Every structure is written in C-alpha cells, then in structure tokens.
Amino acid sequence: MTTNQKTAVSLLGLGAMGHALAAALIDAGHPTTIWNRTPGKADALVARGAKLASTVRDAVSVSPLVVTCLLDHGSVQETLGPVADVMAHRSLVNLTTTTPNQAREFASWADDHDVAYLDGGIMAVPAMIGGPGSAILYSGSSTVFGDHKPVLDLWGESTYFGPDAGMASLYDLAMLASMYVMFGGFMQGAAMVGAAGVTATEFASRTTPFLAAMTAGFSGFAAIIDAKNYTGEGQQSLEFSDLGKIVQTSIDQGVSPDIIAPVQALIRRQIAAGHGKEGFSRIFEELRAGKKGTEVMA
C-alpha cells in the first residue's frame, strides 16, 4: 500500500467513542463511511469529509474494512445479522465492549459467514483517541490485525493477544476491574473523612500520590502469585492485613462498608482456613476458588 492508497473504512456507531474513532480516520485521509441509528449525530463528521450511509447495507458494501462501535453485543448482532451476505469476504473489527464469550460467539458467526474477525478492547476515553496514552487490545484474526495495523494504530497503541477472539475482552475487563475497585476504594475513603467535614478535593490531594506509589507493588504481588510463594520473607501477613478497623470506622462514621467489606471477607476466610501467617497476596487463591460471601466481618 502506498501513501496515496488509504484503506476505505466503514464505521458503524457514532456514540462519543465512535465519533472519536471516525474523526481520527478522516483526519488521516481515509475514505470514511459512517452510519448511526440517529443520523443527526453524523453532521459534524460529514462536514469534515465523511460520507453518511442511509442504511447499514449501504455502509458496509463500500469498504473492505468495517468497524463496529455499538452499544453492546446484541446491538452488533442486530445490526450485522441482516447484512451477513454483504459482509462476506470483508474484515470486521468489533470495538464494542463485550464479554470474552460474546466475542468468541461473534467470531464463530463471522467464520460461518466468511468474515475475517478481529475483536478489540479500547483502553481509553474518547478524548484520548489518537493521542498519548491511548491503547487498544486486539485478538482474533492475525491477518486482519496485520493487514490493517496502520489504521488501528491511528487510534492508539495496538497490541495483539492471539487468535482467541475473547482474549482482548478478557484483558480489557480484567484491567477495568482493577480500575473500578481502586476508584471504589477512593469513594470509600472520601466518604469516611467526608463524615468529619473533609472535602473530597482535600482527600484526593493527599490520596493521589499515596495510591500512585502503592501501584509499584503490583509487580511484587504478581511475582508472589505466579510462584505461589505466600510464605516468603517480607510479606505482610493476612492477620496483619485484617481490615476490621477500617470496616468499624466506616460504620462509626455512618458510612456503608460495602466497598471494603468484600476484601475483609476474603481475608477472614483465608485466616479461617489456616493461612493467617501467609501473605496478603494469598487472597488471589480465594478468588480463584470462586467462593462466595461478602458478609461484613468487623
């Protein structure tokens, strides 16, 4: 492909993320066809050079590469199912957030209809697309990833996780799990000090550098978990890690302990099983065991 031969791309879905993806394509000079259930959302992109298709069939028929960024798995099925015949022999990059099994299900559908399928997980907010820090995880067809990497790289750093179409989604959701639990922990702390009249802004100014420093411990936890070496030197024991005081202080402050209580339950169950002297990382084994129970244990 020469610099004068830009891949034509059809993008379906113009929410905030779809709009950002389309804008990056247009700015890079790719012939871009867009479709959305609500046509009015396309006006700004059309003014920048995109072509608006009136139907999904019209949209996918004009490009070798089709990108979907829709509401959910059901929306992708509903949108592409009726045009499966037109999708045949095209490449499909699905950037809709799905579960790993939903991604695999759609990869199977694509294979049945001669569609080359690549699933993607976007690790960025719309404003980051095409800029520093934006990253998108991919899995599925290595051919699609290789052939269209110049397009994919317009949106952010592209990383391929292999032929299992569900792996990108798995990484995406696992990383988001870490993020949301961290955010939830901040809300818990802000509520605790907030009950004493401290503003969330003041709390954030002190908590941000502390949490940033604590993330350096991830690699240490990872090494312990991979080695299953929960009795090694230098580890904070489960007994020492007991969160009862945090739970009780939350209650004393009139704050729900719903964020911190599940972690306390994991610790307590491991202690009850005889692992109290072992390191905090051992709660990983409790999670892997799939046990349930989020009772408050002060």
Image: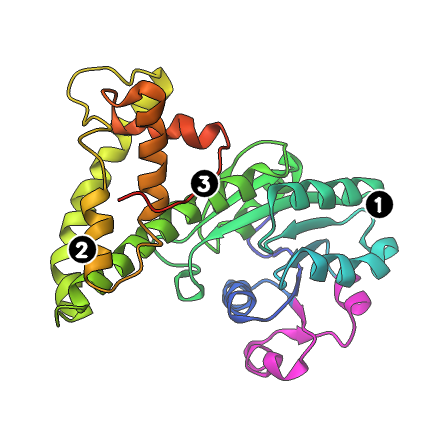
Tell me where residue 227 appears, x and y as whole percent.
34, 16
* Image quadrant where residue 184 sits: bottom left
Q: Are marks 1 and 3 in contact (CB under 8 Å)?
A: no
Tell me where residue 254 appears, x and y as whole percent.
24, 65
Looking at the rendered image, the disc whose residue lies closer to the viewer, 2 or 1, is 2
Whether 196 is drawn above or below 6: the answer is below
Q: CA distance from mark 2 to mark 3?
A: 30 Å
The kind of residue on which mark 2 rests is Thr
The kind of residue on which mark 1 rests is His
Q: Which residue is mark 1?
A: 113
Total numbered circles? 3
Q: Which residue is mark 3?
A: 293
Task: Choose the circle earlier in sequence order: 2 or 1.
Answer: 1
Looking at the rendered image, the disc whose residue lies closer to the viewer, 2 or 3, is 3
Tell me where residue 81 appears, x and y as whole percent.
82, 57
Q: Are marks 2 and 1 in contact (CB under 8 Å)?
A: no
Label 1: element kind: loop
Q: Residue at x 57, y 82 (%)?
A: 47
The kind of residue on which mark 3 rests is Gly
Which of these two is toward me, 291 or 39? Answer: 291
Label 2: element kind: helix
- The crowd level at tag 3 (other Cα within 10 Å; few <14, some 14-19, many 20+) is few
Q: Residue at x 30, y 15 (%)?
A: 229
Looking at the rendered image, the disc whose residue lies closer to the viewer, 1 or 3, is 3
The residue stretch that appears in magenta: 33-62
Label 3: element kind: loop
Q: Which residue is mark 2?
A: 208
